[in-house]
Image: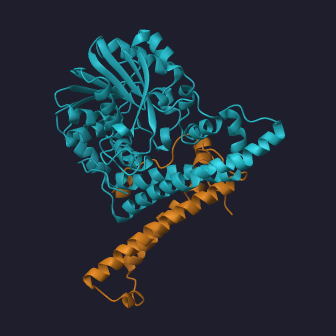
Amino acid sequence: MPNDDDKKIKLPRTAKGKKPQYFSDPTIDKLLSMVLTLMGELSVTRDRLDTVERLIENNGLFKVDDIEGYDIPDDVNQARMERRSAYIARVLKSVQDELDSLQAKGDGKNTQLPEE
Amino acid sequence: MIPLDQHTMLAQTNHDEESRQDFVNDFRVHLASQVFPGNFPTYFNRVLPQFVKNKGREPTDRHEVRKVMTKDPYYQMWSAMQRSSQEMIWDSVVDSVERQLPELNAKAKQSGNKGSLILDPDLEIPKYHTAADIHLQPGAYHSDQSDDDVAAGAVYDRGTYIYSMGGLGTGNNGLGQITQGFFKNEFPDKELERVLDMGCTIGGSVVYWAQQMPDVEFHAIDVGAPVLRYGHARAESLGGAVHFSQQNAECTNFEDNSFDLVTSHILLHETSRTAIQNVFNESYRILKPGGIMMHLDLPQAHGTPPLEGFLFEWEIYNNNEHFYAQLRDMDLVEVCRKAGFKEENIHPKSAGSIWMDDKTPYADDGFEFPIIIGIK
């Protein structure tokens, strides 16, 4: 059975074309990308939390104290792991982009990462 | 940000996707209003005095300004953040499109037939289009990512709205509003039967024209298949009858003397010097005698002070707008002459948000687009 994920369409995430270097050390460029992505993701999280807090207030669903006593079920734990993994990839995209571009230059050869 | 007007092809966002897009918009508004203006005191209070101290004179042109400004830490930080914000636009949009793509592709296939869609799989995509992904949109406008693909169109629709910080209006059609308002004022008695929009992408401008003028026959061309599939379905959903076809504006299959108006909206700066001449030649060929050519594009360099000239060219070097560099110094009146337009029928004009009937928070910024007009 083919995995459903294999059939899923993956859209490109990085534009073709040379990326300028802005600072004397290219590492600073990457760090800035990460900081800005973190800014964005923290803002997204804050918006989501705001939605949750407003819904709680509107509906009186549970006490905010219940959050501290929450027992994480396995499926929720799994979902959180996947979300965290996607989150880390999003913040570290500038590092991945360089790796992708190095691998593309290698024309499919030498794409194995060296062992530590 | 103010949400885009709904139509059946618009990729829907979930909670976090919408929040992420809102953040990118607000971040870009902050960069534009709070950080970008700092380039002026940076130049006049720090970079320029140092230049004068070293050389005993001021920079003569924007190219000299570029050499010194790109070394300044304030400019570097703004520029790097501006570049990141552009990448973040697409990153904030791709998730929702990717998730809904099979449904969007299917919906486009079943769209209505007020207008039409003709694709040409054998069309050669010009090099100025394939050399780099324009505006950093991953995959650009022409790459198919799946069968019957509309991804590039769906990404473009939401992405350009964020790019313009809502300045294109909630119908994403601000440039069409500008050209139509300008046209009606400039040519109040001109009767239109058949109109062509060149380089239409998703048809934002031409659909607006078609909505306002339902008795006119509208055609729209672009080299990108996925943006045309999306554009056709979007037009049908919005009730605009437009005949889309996949063609290069340099060399179309339309008959001689067959259009009353040939127009384009920020197409020229994405093509080459040779292509621009070809586009004007082709416009002349397919216009009826008395027909009007009207191309709206980005400002040229003529007469711009060195610092402003340099800052305006940021997109060329940082946002994959490489071919805009050629347009900056071109003499479009001469291009019109070479295409066959008589001197007295060539009119370089400009138009801005004053002609928009949709007043968004950012529409009234006084920005003027040059419009080159030739009457056959």
What tint does the image give chain B? Answer: cyan
Is residue B322 visible to us here?
yes
Identify the image quadrant of residue B106: top left
Q: Position of residue B245 (x, y in %)?
A: 29, 27
Instruction: Depth check: give the residue in front, B177 or B156.
Output: B177
Q: Residue at x 32, y 55 (%)?
A: B3
What tint does the image give chain A? Answer: orange
In what quadrant of the picture does the C terminus of chain B appear?
Answer: top left
In what quadrant of the picture does the N terminus of chain B appear?
Answer: bottom left
Instruction: Depth check: give the residue in front, B61 or B249.
Output: B61
A27 relative to B108, above or below? below
B345 relative to B297, above or below? above
Is residue B117 visible to us here?
no
Does B305 sit left or right of B374 as displayed? right
Does B59 sit left or right of B242 as displayed? right
Q: How many marks?
A: 0
Q: Position of residue B252 (x, y in %)?
A: 35, 18
Q: Residue at x 34, y 37 (%)?
A: B355
Does B68 sit left or right of B237 as displayed? right
Q: Position of residue B150 (x, y in %)?
A: 32, 42
Identify the image quadrant of residue A63: bottom left
Identify the image quadrant of residue B308: top right
Instruction: Depth check: give the residue in front, B337 or A95.
Output: B337
Does B219 sit left or right of B295 as displayed? left
A5 relative to B176, above or below? below
Q: Residue at x 50, y 49 (%)?
A: B86
